[in-house]
Image (cartoon, grey):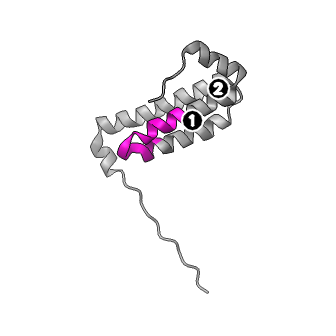
Amino acid sequence: MAELPDFDTLMWMAQHSPAELDQLQQNLSEELISNAGKNAWQLRAVNQHLTHKLARCSNPYQRCITTVTLMRNKFDSLAQVLQDPEHFRNNVAQVLPFKRKSA
């Protein structure tokens, strides 16, 4: 796996080359997801969701809070499944049929 630059380098990139920092983040995320095996599709979905949310942020602090909030929500969901797996298994959506219009 690629090495993460030290904090000072990351700080410099954030201040002087944000596009390069974003590219680094994308590359590291993709490398991690590619090595995730059967869970790659789930991680790719979370990463895409995070990317869309981060695109709406106007500053680094908002990006940080958005990322932490999203990850905390994902961990809370996972904790609920681990604590009560039967509730998760029994949670089935009700499928409603479309009513056809008569011609």
Q: Nearer the viewer, residue 45 or 4?
A: 4
CA–CA distance between discs 2 and 1? 19 Å
Residue 10 located left or right of residue 46? right
> Magenta segment range?
26-43
What is the quadrant of the N terminus in the image?
top left
What residue do we see at 66% from left, 16% from top? Answer: 12
Which residue in the rendered view is the most extreme toward the front? 2
The structure residue drawn at horizontal position 54% and vertical position 19%, both measured from the top left corner, is 5
Q: Which residue is mark 2?
A: 62
**Above or below for 95 versus 40:** below
Query: Farthest top residue?
Result: 8
Question: Residue 29, position in %: x, y?
Answer: 51, 35
User: Of circles 2 and 1, which is in front?
Assistant: 1
Of residues 86 and 17, the one nearer the viewer is: 17
Residue at left offset 50%, top offset 45%: 45
- Give the position of the C terminus as an image quadrant: bottom right
Q: Nearer the viewer, residue 102 or 89?
A: 89
Q: Residue at x 66, y 21 (%)?
A: 14
The rendered magenta stretch, by its main secondary structure, is classed as helix
Task: Choose top left, top right, bottom left or bottom right for residue 56.
Answer: top right
Instruction: Give the labeled residue for mark 1.
Output: 26
Three-letter code, disc 2: Gln
The answer to whether marks 2 and 1 mark residues whose Cβ atoms lie closer than 8 Å is: no
Return the mark for residue 17: none
The quadrant in which residue 78 appears is top left
* Residue 72 included in the magenta stretch of the image: no
Residue 58: image location, x then y, percent: 71, 29
Question: Tag 1: Cα neighbours inside 10 Å, few (<14), some, or many (≥20)?
Answer: some
